[in-house]
Image: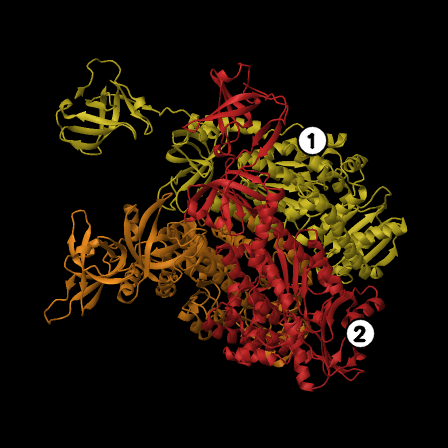
Chain colours: A orange, B red, C yellow
């Protein structure tokens, strides 16, 4: 037995080995804390860590009685040739304990494939936890990649229940290859904290920040107004790429019309490519990206509730992070705010790219990023589709050739009167699209949006828009669908036109009104809004004069104007004052809008509305676009 | 060749070995039935069982001609040192055959993990059969646990097609470990019958009965009326726990309102815990438990058809048992019986816990258990939520702390006037909930029930009710949702109130009527029933007098009363007599109800209804709760 | 170094080995193209193929400088005892290169199970490609069977991205057994073309053609009219069996009524059996067969869009072929053609079996096969159910006993007046079904079709029709459901009958009209069409005279006649001429039909319609069947 050193200097140091320490981390003549794990005639077997143990020979101490489990202090006397360690017991009156962390060589996740069969050490963030019928699988991501780490407690029982998604961990385990994928069978896993965790987080953060940075792109056309918005789009691209890198799902909600499709489909396509690259898994886009058409022109509470519910279920079931919500061609208005507030209690960032007249005061406090041409002194003429084609090119390089015709479709669909439309049309023409065919694409998109209802119909829409689609089929499909749409519109108008009522109102405009529920087929294409728009377009063409058209049903009215300035929000406010009990709501902007009311008050509401329109200011510049 | 023994005593015994018998079960000098499986120069190879075979040396018989497949009788002459068996042919004129069963040491399912690599014998019930692309997996449960047993016939081909779910079997097989789970690779499987099967069934039954026994609980509050119902709730708890143990799925249908949520969510939570414990599989609750809000206040034929269809598909696809149907805060009335009858042709037990006015004569013959305070001389004041919190505590111990505030929410939601509400409120107050916040929870539940429609929205509702939810989020989410609900109600009433018509009817009560389809927004929260209720509440407050409110649409009317005794079933019966061709149906109780009629007869129905109400008896004690 | 041969004859031949060639395919003294893969002091290591390499000893050439990757020509000088190959460098001025294909023994897919552990060669068509998180799985089918072939590039990364579904390939790989299924771990895969591909395709084609040939069957009853249609049904059976063999999914759309169920369920049952046999996978029918009730009596554009969308998603996600569309008891009319045209841009064959009045001019150019009794001079009396029971028997032998009662149900459901009904009834009687029970089955099917809406409810319908169902349950379930249907009809008629208006019109017929939306319950069974039919039947029975019944709602009218010849298509055309702005459409045939119009024009449309009916020709022979 070693006695305490006689000198009166500093007390001796006793090392407390981390359980993961190996024999490479001990040295002769050091003192260690140890635990007795065997008592034999010739001495004691002691454990210093999970991997370090040895013998205290009986001859080195006076044969006191020890039991398995006793804590002792030992001194390492010899490391034998065969690696065995010999100790002697230490009897120190006074000492200082110093912890020794396990020193390990960290392996990058990307490199585990070179270490099959070896014990390795990984540091990273737990991005997913999946309980199988057998082991628990922790997906651990470091700055290079993500690796599944399997731990087994009992069949179907969650191993290491304290470890949660988002924890920064150190994993020790053996690399295995299983059907060509690599995984680490966990021997130890510990949550890192303090400096260690900060180091890992910093490395991840730096790697993500670098990787999230969008590629440099030049805009497709020369348009200063658009260029002014590019920095904001780059920021959105950065946010979306970062979400992908962090394994956060993206839930995309978009207006279900032509421009909304032209906005969302390129972004979907670009994100799909980026997700496949990052996660090296063909199934990953299905889990990490959803595109969902919205039935209303704003984010309804029911949709938000459903989105939140799905997100929470996915988190509970698959250990997924809560999603980022990306609103496209929707989301800029005050009507969107109740839904945003519902999500506000959860970790769900919201990003909006829209070109409808925004209400930044209401919206901005609730969303993380908000891109809208009106916030730059521009207007709807920069359509969301135009913005999102630029966004898609920032999300994933190399898509330009496939997307060159899309902004023109977006512009035509939303009747953009921008001078720069000619550049987009020229770009599309060079890609083989004449203006007539671009129009047809827009009509085909609108028709399919109706037929698909709430289904994104990705493959079908890819063919219609010719984004990652089949060119030949695209060329056949678009005229067929556009033609179907034409025929259905013609049939609807055949029934409706003879019931359109005309009057010339005080300001000189032609006012047309039609009961679209009573004089058009219900539950078929085109829906009342589109039917009203088509009637309006015909009347504008027929008369060449200022025209207002009202298509109404039992509890709604769709409004369209050419050459008359309608301040719809003000009219709605006034109607509410004048007609208590009519429950009027709705919105729109200058030349297009819609209102709702309770069915029993339809007549007074319509009468009052028309009276207001009769006094609205004429303005030759105004044409009814974008449709809503 | 052995000749028949010469003495005239009892004929010799020839043993017929069970195919599973081993060499340990044969003895020299015994006769055995055997089958020739090889003919060689020097003798015959014979099989006595799948594991016992040996040689009949040519020298021991006179060289008669034999063919493979011949049945012979042999006598065991020697067991050689190397284990080989030598036989001689027996030529017995007369003998008695005795079957010898295979003797084996049964291993408990719980212990197979200790026997990896060994051949073991299991006895138990087949609780699931799953066909994979490779082997067939039989899940066999004994009194300790369940074990997957894999049998391979050909890729994707059902092995042992005669074995069905519910069979009691003896499995012989080799224990394997696969990713930390144990399974038995079947070498033989046989259906047990007679005494053997009965033994297994008895063991299972005893084990299940013991395990199914609910823990002892004390009710949360001191309430004799409630206590009288505890034995029935214990019985329901026993039935549900037993279903879980037997692997029978539970399909829960509940009224989609505040009390219905307060009833079903704690039961869902408790059952989820219990299922996870029993099946040691985090995915098991998803397969074995579904909570489904009902759109109507009774069990509709369409819902029953859908439930049955799902159950049959699950059985066909996953080999699952048919479910138990648990009706909560719904299910006690005659309107539920057609749906019950549709299920009656299938093995689907039905258990009802409800507090709406019951019709035991119609319901009881069709359900297995029926708990309802009215059947104990009590009434709606013991809400289903109060009952089900007690039930949840019996289903799984240790949940009390998490559920203490729930009965108070249930009582407030259904306006329970029970004196004991004060105890529940006190209990909730101690848990940190003031009455105002409890009200808000009820309103938030009602609002989310509307927004979620047919989706249970489990994770979201857990947060709203703070059952296994996030406390901080709960505290933020509830006021937000309650406030949204308030605003939506206010908007609806803004439109509606000015269209409410008033008259004072013969019995002195104030009668208010409103066309809720015409003077309220459609397809938004609050729905017509709730809108009517809110109008009614305002009028009760305003007048302080007896009030009847009728909210009607094209083919329905919602009825509410305070201080007037409405016998709605009788009124419906009378209306049907007086107005043939009006197709009146519906129900309710004293102060709340709803009726339906054909649209073309609305006016006469409403007129006749109001006439009857004008003569109804006043009763100050009556207040309109619970809502329906 | 070998110099070029001196004689002036043909240039020497240098062999270019296929990468898969082995040492068995080289011979001494031949020249080969080779690549340097190692340079050492004593010579060069060269590769002739992936499996053939050897040493060019330094002594055999003059020591020129070579680098790894250099292309050289070598001559094989010696094959040593240990298999090593010795070469010398050749310096040929002029030579002719001849490719040497790798010679291999093709193994039939059916036989790979006998070759576990061996390297084998397969030739076949890629019928599915599935990307897992690990390897890519190519399902390769030859004339005997299909085998999964796994190839690994990197975890979750598509291996051999050039290989597509439909390619004819040669696979070299090692056979592995995995949980009892066999798979080939790919070492090489190449797309075959030219003659090689044609050989494989021919073998597949011949095998498929043979296997697709339907078994010979005799019709269930002696009916020349039906027999004349059998060759066409055989052709349909061949097409469907071929689709199964080729792994093409079948999507079945059918009329959701009694006859439609009697048509589609036997075909579903037979195809399920055949798919399980062919694909040896219990899950295969779920992937390869969908039965979908159509809500409308024709193929709606929305359904076609949804079908196409699902098909495209399945192809993208699971690598499945696009489906074959099988229309049953629907699909023969001009109204189906827009939907057919939508599919026409994709590889989706369409097969129709229907007995409604067909429009072959419109339909036939768009479909691959079209079976309809009218095209044989017969009529609706040969119901689709009768045709499809014969079809099912051709699809899979041995089902006759289970289907004998089905044609009688079909005939009764669609009120077939064929004389041969007596044979079908007799057949059913012998199978234990009296006519009353057969009627009840029809009513139960109709009721369940309503309750299930868009869900096929396979297991439930199997029980109701007793096709692969439970006989005992069938006997209990059918009367219960038929009785429910009766009660619901009675309740509906109780409300409706007193509102039926009667007039005797010019041609002497009784005309009855009823507003079925206003005087019947909405959204319950029976729906307006059935309600109208039941009223009509009562009136026919009551009067014994010619009867026309019109049941109308806001925008539709259902027409039924007995004893009056209604030319509905002509009436629709005339109404459209006479009433511009009424948007009349619809169809039907002689005694049954329906029309739609815009709600605002209901009165003039009904007035004009009745005027036309008043002049329609009486014809005692005409009875209103089949219902639509």
Please tell me which residue lies in front, B99 or C307: B99
Residue at 86%, 57% (x, y): give it: C502
Seen in the image, is C95 located left or right of residue B163? left
Residue at 57%, 51% (x, y): give it: B204
**Residue topped by disc 2:** B607
Q: Residues within 10 Å of mark 2 (few under 14, many from 20)?
A: few
The residue marked by circle 2 belongs to what chain? B
Placement of the C terminus of chain A among the 4 image quadrants: bottom right
Which mark, residue B449?
Answer: none
Please tell me which residue lies in front, C435 or C626: C435
Q: Quadrant of residue C173?
A: top left
Residue A266, visible in the rendered structure: no
Seen in the image, is C422 located left or right of residue B331? right
Which secondary structure, mark 1? helix
User: Residue C303: horizontal and vertical position, in percent?
Assistant: 61, 50
Placement of the N terminus of chain A among the 4 image quadrants: bottom left
Q: CA distance from mark 2 to mark 1?
A: 63 Å
Count of marks placed on residues: 2
Q: Is residue A413 above or below residue B4?
A: below
**Residue topped by disc 1:** C230
User: Residue C377: horizontal and vertical position, in percent?
Assistant: 75, 34
Q: Quadrant of residue A263?
A: bottom left
Please report contact status of discs 2 and 1: CB closer than 8 Å, yes or no.
Answer: no
The residue marked by circle 1 belongs to what chain? C
Residue A233, visible in the rendered structure: yes
């Amino acid at each position: 037995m070693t006695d305490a050193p006689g000198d009166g200097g500093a007390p001796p140091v006793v090392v407390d080995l981390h359980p993961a320490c190996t024999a490479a981390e001990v040295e002769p003549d050091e003192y260690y804390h140890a635990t007795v794990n065997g008592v034999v005639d010739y001495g004691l077997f002691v454990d210093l860590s999970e991997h370090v143990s040895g013998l205290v020979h009986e001859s080195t101490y006076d044969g006191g009685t020890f039991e398995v489990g006793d804590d002792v202090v030992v001194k390492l006397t010899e490391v034998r040739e065969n690696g065995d360690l010999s100790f002697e017991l230490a009897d120190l009156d006074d000492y200082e304990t110093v912890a020794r962390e396990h020193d390990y060589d960290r392996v990058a996740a990307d490199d585990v494939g070179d270490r099959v069969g070896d014990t390795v050490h990984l540091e990273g963030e737990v991005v997913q936890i999946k309980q199988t019928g057998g082991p628990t699988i922790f997906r651990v991501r470091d700055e290079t990649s993500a690796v599944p780490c399997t731990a087994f407690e009992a069949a179907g029982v969650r191993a290491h229940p304290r470890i949660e998604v988002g924890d920064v961990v150190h994993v020790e385990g053996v690399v295995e290859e299983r059907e060509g994928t690599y995984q680490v069978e966990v021997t130890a896993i510990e949550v890192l904290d303090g400096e260690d965790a900060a180091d890992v987080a910093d490395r991840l953060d730096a790697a993500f920040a670098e990787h999230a940075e969008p590629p440099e792109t030049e805009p497709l056309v020369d348009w200063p107004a658009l260029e002014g918005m590019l920095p904001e789009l780059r920021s959105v691209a950065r946010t979306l790429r970062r979400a992908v890198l962090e394994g956060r799902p993206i839930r995309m909600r978009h207006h279900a019309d032509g421009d909304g499709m032209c906005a969302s489909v390129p972004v979907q396509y670009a994100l799909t490519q980026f997700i496949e690259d990052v996660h090296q898994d063909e199934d990953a886009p299905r889990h990490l990206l959803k595109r969902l058409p919205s039935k209303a022109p704003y984010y309804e509470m029911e949709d938000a509730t459903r989105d939140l519910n799905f997100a929470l279920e996915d988190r509970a079931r698959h250990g997924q992070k809560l999603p980022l919500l990306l609103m496209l061609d929707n989301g800029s208005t005050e009507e969107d705010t109740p839904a945003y507030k519902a999500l506000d209690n959860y970790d769900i960032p919201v990003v909006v790219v829209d070109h409808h007249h925004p209400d930044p005061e209401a919206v901005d406090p609730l969303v993380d990023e908000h891109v809208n041409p009106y916030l730059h002194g521009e207007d709807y003429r920069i359509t969301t589709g135009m913005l999102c084609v630029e966004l898609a090119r920032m999300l994933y390089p190399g898509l330009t050739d496939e997307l060159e015709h899309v902004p023109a479709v977006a512009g035509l669909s939303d009747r953009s009167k921008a001078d720069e439309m000619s550049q987009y049309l020229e770009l599309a023409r060079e890609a083989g699209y004449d203006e007539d065919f671009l129009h047809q694409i827009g009509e085909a998109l609108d028709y399919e949006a109706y037929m698909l209802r709430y289904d994104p119909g990705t493959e079908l829409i890819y063919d219609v828009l010719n984004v990652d689609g089949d060119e030949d089929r695209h060329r056949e499909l678009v005229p067929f669908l556009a033609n179907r749409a034409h025929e259905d519109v013609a049939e609807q108008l055949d029934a409706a036109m003879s019931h359109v009522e005309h009057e010339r109102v005080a300001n000189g405009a032609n006012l047309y009104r039609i009961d679209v529920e009573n004089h058009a087929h219900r539950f078929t294409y085109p829906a009342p809004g589109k039917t009203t728009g088509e009637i309006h377009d015909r009347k504008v063409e027929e008369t060449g004069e200022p025209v207002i058209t009202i298509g109404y049903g039992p509890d709604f009215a769709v409004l369209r104007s050419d050459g008359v300035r309608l301040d719809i929000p003000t009219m709605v406010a006034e109607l509410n004052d004048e007609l208590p009990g009519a429950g009027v709501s709705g919105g729109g902007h200058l030349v297009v809008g819609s209102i709702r009311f309770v069915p029993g008050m339809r007549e007074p509401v319509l009468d009052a509305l028309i009276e207001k329109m009769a006094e609205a200011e004429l303005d030759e510049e105004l044409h009814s676009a974008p449709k809503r």
